[in-house]
Amino acid sequence: MNNKKVISVLLSSTLVLSLANSAYAATILKYGMRSPEVRHLQQNLNKAGYFVTANPTDYFGPATKNAVMRLQKDYNLVPDGIYGPLTEKALMDKLNAISKATTQTSNTSLQTQSTVTRTLKYGMQGNDVKELQNALAKLGYFNTTPTGYFGSITRDAVIKFQKANNLTPDGIVGPLTQKTIQGLLAGKDQQASQPTDSPKIQYPSGFSRNMKKGDTGDDVKLLQTLLKEIGYYTKDITGTYDDNTLNAVMDFQKYYSLAVDGIAGINTITKVIEINNQVKAVKGFYVQGKGGYGHGVGMTQFGAKGMAEQEYKYDEIIKYYYTGVNIEKRNTDNVNIKVKISLDLGSPDINITSDQPYSVVYKTKDNDTEQIVENQIACPAQSTTSFKYMDGNIVITNDKVIDDSTQLPQTIVSIDAVRVIPSDTGVLSYINKGNPLPYAGEFKIYPNNSSKNLDLINILPLEEYLRGVVPAEMPSSWHEEAEEALKAQTLAARTYALRRISDKKIFDVYDSTLSQAYKGLSVVNDKVDNLIKATKGEVVTYNGGLADTVYSASAGGYTVDSTFAWGGSDVPYLKGKPDPYDNSKYATYWWNVNITRDQISSAYPQVGVVLNVEITNKMFDRPVELKITGTKGTIVVKNKDFRDAIEKAVGKKLFISEYYTISLQK
């Protein structure tokens, strides 16, 4: 046995002995720790081929964590970057395997020795530069004849190598760059020096060799196909291992912590197939949602019903959904409210009628004095008055008021807003799509120069207004089983409206969900009227002021803070809380939708082909942030941004509400 062989055996024996005497998991090491044991770990990782640094330290930083994760992935352990008992055993097994392989090799050294003893950079020349060029050529970075001169071609090759191996890309070959080159060459030499009687490498189906730049064949074509399916190769499938294929392989190797050498060896091929199988396993994602009817702030109407059915009183319902409020009584006898009525969009005219005689008050300008004069038309019962916008004025025509000179319906032009006033016993009706809808109080009609149309405003006493709101917002039939819910609804509606009354606007509230539903006298109900009278003037207050008693049909089983729904400053009485009293279908997952993998991938191309989507942060049981994992990266996005991006990619509305779960559909 020659001296080299003896030394090799002694070294390997010493290594095996030291490994055998080590105690697994004496200490768990993880990111951020400082300990002499970290230095020992880094040294062992370097020996095992999981290069950390040329100068081991006591600090467990990102490079150490990444090396541990690469080891864990190779041994099918959870890649959490924590060095514990199982990971230590894997490292010991790796080092023992290397020791055994060293003992069985021939006299040929497994490490490619380097005669580079100086820092190399642009402008230098010599045998060490030529050796550098040969090494870079062997690793696939230098594609011309070595000359021994460090010119721009050599510098560019060095920079490309440094970038691929997470080194500072300065084009200077210092100790760390030299160490990394030697480490990669050692791995290639070790592979080349396998004993002839060692087991033959078993390549996956379709592959029988390592592939590198310049190779051609069906195996290269298969590699390109697999890389394309997982989002790394974007060019045509040619079967030629060209620069596009090389770059795709190196990008893949870098992301999956493989040796970045641009060669599709057994580890790279196996990993490509593994990721491709993961991609094929993901068909799409299944989304289940609930809620969807309302903003989820304040009282829920179905929740109020549930509380009433459990014999809670209306004041208890109010105080559950509005935190820290009180119920007080205000004088509402002389309080009027102005309601903007939704118009029939199919007609540019507003048509008003009444079961009794009524009056239309309009304004004209006196030609002599230039003063504004108020005039009045007496309209017969059952007659219809039509109002139409014209250049900032209102054209008025009553079908039964005849012009004596023409014997046709008289046409009058008002230069300002018009009032329509019923008789003491009469009721005005707005004719919507041919149907007369009765309203208490009077109408006021304004020319709207922005829309070139008219605004119809219903002006009536506040308590009369509630007769058209409460039955429109909550079914009157709930009177039998949930009377207290109707009372709570009355207080919420009264307070909401009273808070918004102002003399500075032409109207206070809309008649739709923009404010609260209001349908005039067409929905009045005797039993609801009695509840309105029984709670007359009762309002919800916070610190003596009127509370903003917003409400919705259902919050899906959990209400939210006002800031969560609308942003802005905190409202102390509008706090999110569980809503266990809501027994409606909206409190269960009642809507669902399927989203394909490709639809999400097209919305987030930066992550490659999507492998998973998971909700990582919730508030009020609703998604706040989601993590999207793909073949090329991972991102975290906000709930609204996610919904908007997916709907844009799909080209239609998918999410009925923001309250949902998402799961992998395989």
Image (tube, rainbow, N blue to C red):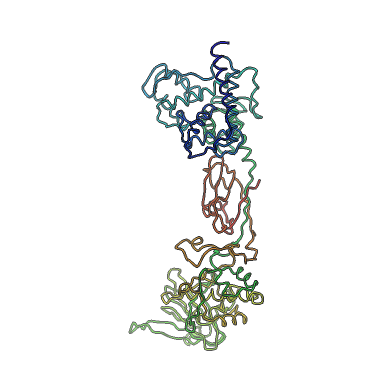
Residue lying furthest left in this view?
Answer: 369
Residue 6: x and y in percent read: 56, 14
Question: To which quarter of the image does residue 482 belong?
Answer: bottom right
The vertical placement of 440 against 287, above or below, is below
**Where is residue 619 drawn, in percent x and y?**
54, 57
Give percent across and percent down for residue 51.
50, 29
Which quadrant of the rendered structure holds the N terminus? top right
Residue drawn 55% across and 41% down? 608
Q: Quadrant of the C terminus?
A: top right
Compared with residue 391, is residue 27 higher up or lower down, i.e. above or below?
Answer: above
The x, y position of residue 226, in whole percent, is 60, 35
Viewer-proximal residue, 640 or 53? 53
Picture quadrant where residue 356 is located:
bottom right
Outermost residue toward the bottom in this view: 424
Counting every numbered tag in the picture gives 0
Q: Is residue 361 above or below residue 597?
A: below
* Residue 570 shows in this picture: yes
Q: Can residue 233 be seen here?
A: no
Comparing 666 with 144, the one in front is: 666
Residue at the image position 56 percent from the left and 25 percent from the top: 18
Between 387 and 2, the one lying in front of the other is 2
Looking at the image, residue 274 sits to the left or right of residue 130; the answer is: right
Q: In front here: 554 or 388?
A: 554
Q: Quadrant of residue 87?
A: top right
